[in-house]
Amino acid sequence: MRDAMNNLGGDSNKINPSVPVDLVIDHSVQVDVARSENAVQANMELGFQRNKERFAFLKWGSNAFQNMLVVPPGSGIVHQVNLEYLGRVVFNTDGLLYPDSVVGTDSHTTMIDGLGVAGWGVGGIEAEAAMLGQPMSMVLPGVVGFKLSGKLRDGVTATDLVLTVTQMLRKHRVVGKFVEFYGEGMSELSLANRATIANMSPESDETVSSSVLLKECRDIQLRCGSSGHDQVDDSKAIAPVGMDVESDPENAILERLTFKDINGLVEQNVQLKSLVRDLSDQIEDREMVFKEKFEMELKKHTDEAASKVAAVLQRAEEQGHMIESLHTSVAMYKRLYEEEHKLRSSYSHSSDAVTVEDSGRKNRLLLLEDSQGATKKTQEKVVERLRSLEEDLAKSKSDIILLRSERDKLALDAKFARERLDSFMKEFEYQRNEMNENLVASEELSRKLNMEVSVLKLENEILSNAERRACDEVRSLSERVHRLQATLDIIHSAEEAREEARAA
């Protein structure tokens, strides 16, 4: 646009944003150094090296354009910088006072609403159009009033409050509406807590979460050093809606929500914490009981399987000894049978050669035949018994194989269950360590915040003392000036008298 103005022969320096524009270079999205003391400084230096040309261009723009402020990198997050340094709250133009408002290219621009400044997020094209003085058109939003009563007690944080508020606003469906918080509960909330509530506006989809302008909103800017903008007399701009005067939003509010007792959050918080603690204790108790039962059941199954295997092995060993003894008996009967068969053969040959029959020899032959029959029967019984024992042995072997496979299966199941138990215990231990680390981090953060509060109090005291000393010095200097002025007047009078005397 400035080039076009130069081509047309005009003054290009007149091309400037029509409204105040603040460009904040936020945190770097690329992190190269971490877990070290100089990580922030190292990442900032690398960011300067990568974006040197961009930063140089932005610096030129901040000097070349009027009504434009560029916040350099490393100053902080844009919403916090806007809250502590950039928000004007009230403009003073030639004695005309009017409230501040802002639009930003981020959905959490609504954080400034906690300071009493109407602000919300818009698209990049809308923001550029506003910079060039174009009006922003929007459907007239409905206004939802949210009345707060009571105050936060110890143990309740703004997070507890904002989660409950967000839940209530979501149920009420406040999409595209303006939500105004009012009531004595707002006067009891600090600016940080109100900014936390306003910062959560995108979570419930309302456009703006406005709050009344309280005197401490101005105090926070003075404390953070926001003194470069138009200054307004606090007694004129803030007193009408100060701490002791409650605004009357009833005329503009179309819908109302009421959070009657903020104190109730402490009971909810305590109940939730006790519930979490009870659940943790129950989980630990159940884990111990489950572990004991599992170990007892595993030991029981292992002992039963071992006893079964030992009994089967003992029975197989006994059957083996019995089979060996039967084999020995069969061998002995077989040897007797062979001897009797040889003896009978010899007797039959001798009976063929000798023609004279002897009654005593016949009796012996009959006895041999009877013993041979008994031996055959005994041998058959032994063979049958041996066959049945071999079948029992094969069956016992198959039972042993089945029991061994069952034992191996139980061992695998036990190993798998033990691995699952170990992994579960490791996961539980990891979660417990993580919770402990979070608690330690929270305690450390609380300690740091307490230290920062103490430092701020000390700084406030130092500033008060310095201001008091400065006032005393100014007073003493004024007195000295008056004395010097009186001395100069006397000298001047003396010179005039001398001149008159000379003239006379």
Image (cartoon, helix red, strand yellow):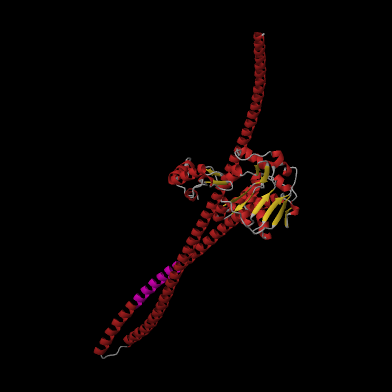
Residue 73, can we see it? no
Q: Residue furthest front?
A: 504
Q: Nearer the viewer, residue 321 or 436?
A: 436
x 37%, y 74%: residue: 327
Q: Position of residue 157 (x, y in %)?
A: 65, 47
Which quadrant of the figure contains the C terminus? top right
Magenta-tinted stretch: 313-333
* Residue 100, image x, y percentages: 64, 47
Q: Work out whether residue 108 or residue 416 is closer to the camera in this orientation and state it.
A: 108
Q: Is residue 15 above or below residue 173?
A: above
Q: Is 451 situated above or below 349?
A: above
In the figure, is residue 70 to the left or right of 110?
Answer: left
Could you tell me which residue is drawn at 64 percent across and 13 percent down? Answer: 495
Q: Residue at x 66, y 22 (%)?
A: 476
* Figure check: 430 above or below 342: above
Residue 438 belongs to the span the image colors magenta: no
Total numbered circles: 0
Q: Is 316 one of the magenta-colored residues?
A: yes
Q: Is residue 212 left or right of residue 387?
A: right
Question: Which of the pair 185/121 is nearer the observer?
Answer: 121
Q: Is residue 52 visible?
A: yes
Q: Main secondary structure of the magenta part?
A: helix
Say which quarter of the image contains residue 174. bottom right
**Residue 95 image position (x, y, % from top left):** 68, 41
Q: Position of residue 267 (x, y in %)?
A: 70, 51
Left or right: where 146 falls relative to 353: right
Single out the residue that lies furthest toward the left.
353
Closer to us: 423 or 319: 423
